[in-house]
């Protein structure tokens, strides 16, 4: 355990090493916090939270789960009344989606197309906060062609995005 003098010296050293880079400082302070509080919530640094999304994903990676596509879905919405399920992956406006991630979204879409009980939508939202504009890419399984096709729709307001999230948009 660090005593007060050691802790102060570590903080001053981190500030000096950061050279104004706030993200470096946040990451290093997060590591220091975890070091000082090992039984804390998830024992993950800021960078690990960004890369893995959850402690379970980190554990699966450390357990060397291989030959399996491992993704973290950003949002899943379900309406009991309409039995509508919307699976949403989020990417920043300029961010790319990996092949494995896209393949898994296509599997969800195909499974949804096979369901007679639920209306399943699978999509990727490309935007940045505050979500006043962006693109929604719908991944739909075409039973005739037996493959997934993509449809794009631009949204130009937070209102359009709210409708999409509330499952009230009429896209079909």
Image (tube, grey):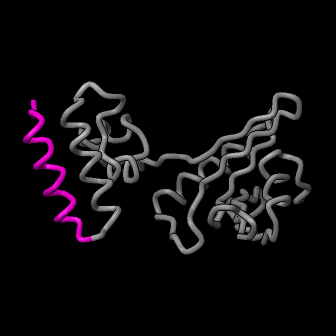
The residue sitting at 38% across, 47% down in the picture is 49
Q: Nearer the viewer, residue 114 or 93?
A: 93
Hey, which residue is sitting farthest top in the picture? 39
* Magenta-colored segment: predominant secondary structure: helix
11 drawn magenta: yes
Q: Position of residue 34 (x, y in %)?
A: 25, 37
Residue 163 seen in the current view: yes
User: Magenta segment, which residues?
Assistant: 1-19
The residue sitting at 29% across, 70% down in the picture is 20
Q: Position of residue 87 (x, y in %)?
A: 67, 46
Q: Is residue 43 above or below residue 131?
A: above
Q: Quadrant of the C terminus?
A: bottom right
Q: Position of residue 145 (x, y in %)?
A: 73, 64
Image quarter of residue 86:
top right
Q: Quadrant of the N terminus?
A: top left
The residue sitting at 68% across, 61% down in the picture is 130
Q: Nearer the viewer, residue 7 or 67?
A: 7
Left or right: 171 as drawn, with respect to 9: right
Q: Nearer the viewer, residue 101 or 4?
A: 4
Q: Position of residue 80 (x, y in %)?
A: 82, 28
């Amino acid at each position: 355990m660090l005593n007060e003098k050691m802790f102060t010296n570590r903080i001053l050293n981190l500030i000096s090493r950061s050279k104004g880079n706030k993200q470096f400082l946040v990451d290093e302070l997060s590591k220091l916090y975890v070091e000082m509080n090992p039984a804390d919530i998830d024992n993950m640094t800021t960078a690990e939270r960004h890369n893995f999304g959850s402690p379970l994903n980190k554990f699966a990676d450390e357990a060397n789960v291989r030959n399996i596509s491992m993704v973290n879905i950003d949002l899943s919405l379900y309406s009991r009344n309409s039995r509508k399920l919307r699976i949403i992956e989020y990417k920043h406006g300029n961010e790319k989606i990996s092949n494995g991630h896209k393949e898994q979204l296509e599997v969800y879409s195909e499974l949804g197309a096979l369901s007679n009980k639920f209306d399943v939508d699978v999509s990727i939202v490309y935007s940045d906060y505050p979500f006043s504009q962006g693109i929604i890419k719908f991944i739909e399984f075409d039973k005739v062609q037996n493959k997934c096709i993509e449809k794009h729709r631009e949204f130009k307001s937070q209102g359009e995005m709210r409708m999409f999230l509330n499952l009230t948009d009429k896209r079909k």
